[in-house]
Image (cartoon, rainbow, N blue to C red):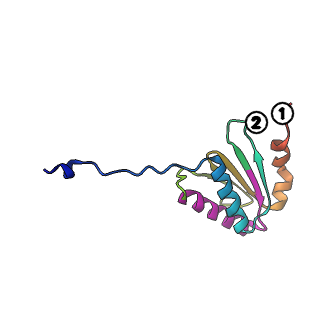
């Protein structure tokens, strides 16, 4: 066998996006899909579950579902493979865990009921 045949194929290691890049992607995707009241919360120093939380509203169950699906596809396209999703069948509140960024897409009435912005935006005692 020739030496060239024994050489393993070169692997290209693509770096995964960091938290700030994921946040920018999420925000841009939500804006493109006409999400409403987009809020980004910096969680660094508050918890170890993620660096950022993004909260947005959709106008209806169908809109919430479409926004969530487009966001999941965009995250996977940049190499985030293990995106965890909760609440997609009902689409009242869809939670998307993209590792360092957690995204909540709500219908407006569900968002106002749970009011998670207030819980996570406050300062620590």
* Residue in view at x 85 percent, y 37 percent: 123
Using a 10 Å C-alpha cutoff, classify the residue at mark 2 as few (fewer than 14 neighbours), some (14 to 19) or many (20 or more): some
Q: CA distance from mark 2 to mark 1?
A: 7 Å
Q: Which residue is mark 1?
A: 124
Q: Is residue 67 part of the magenta span, yes or no? A: yes
* Residue in view at x 75 percent, y 68 percent: 34
Can I make out residue 96 in this image? Answer: no
Q: Is residue 98 part of the magenta span, yes or no? A: no
Residue farthest front in this picture: 3
* Residue in view at x 30 percent, y 51 percent: 9
Q: Position of residue 121 (x, y in %)?
A: 83, 44
Element type at mark 1:
loop
Numbered range of the magenta stretch = 54-77
Residue 46 numbered tag: 2
Element type at mark 2:
loop
Q: Mark 2 touching mark 1, by CB under 8 A?
A: yes
Left or right: 10, with 42 as reference point: left
Vertical placement of residue 16 versus 28, above or below: above
Quarter of the image that includes the C terminus: top right
Using a 10 Å C-alpha cutoff, classify the residue at mark 1 as few (fewer than 14 neighbours), some (14 to 19) or many (20 or more): few
* Residue in view at x 84 percent, y 50 percent: 115
Left or right: 117, with 74 as reference point: right
Nearest the eye: 82 or 43: 43
């Amino acid at each position: 066998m020739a030496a060239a045949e024994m050489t393993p194929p070169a692997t290209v290691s693509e770096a995964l996006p960091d938290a700030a890049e994921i946040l920018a992607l999420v925000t841009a995707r939500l804006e493109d899909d006409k999400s409403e009241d987009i809020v980004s919360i910096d969680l660094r120093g508050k918890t170890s579950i993620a660096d950022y939380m993004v909260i947005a509203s959709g106008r209806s169950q169908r809109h919430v579902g479409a926004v969530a699906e487009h966001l999941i596809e965009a995250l996977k396209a940049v190499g985030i493979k293990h995106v965890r999703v909760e609440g997609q069948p009902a689409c009242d509140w869809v939670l998307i865990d993209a590792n360092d960024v957690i995204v909540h897409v709500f219908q407006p009435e569900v968002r106002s009921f749970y009011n998670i912005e207030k819980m996570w935006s406050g300062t620590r005692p």
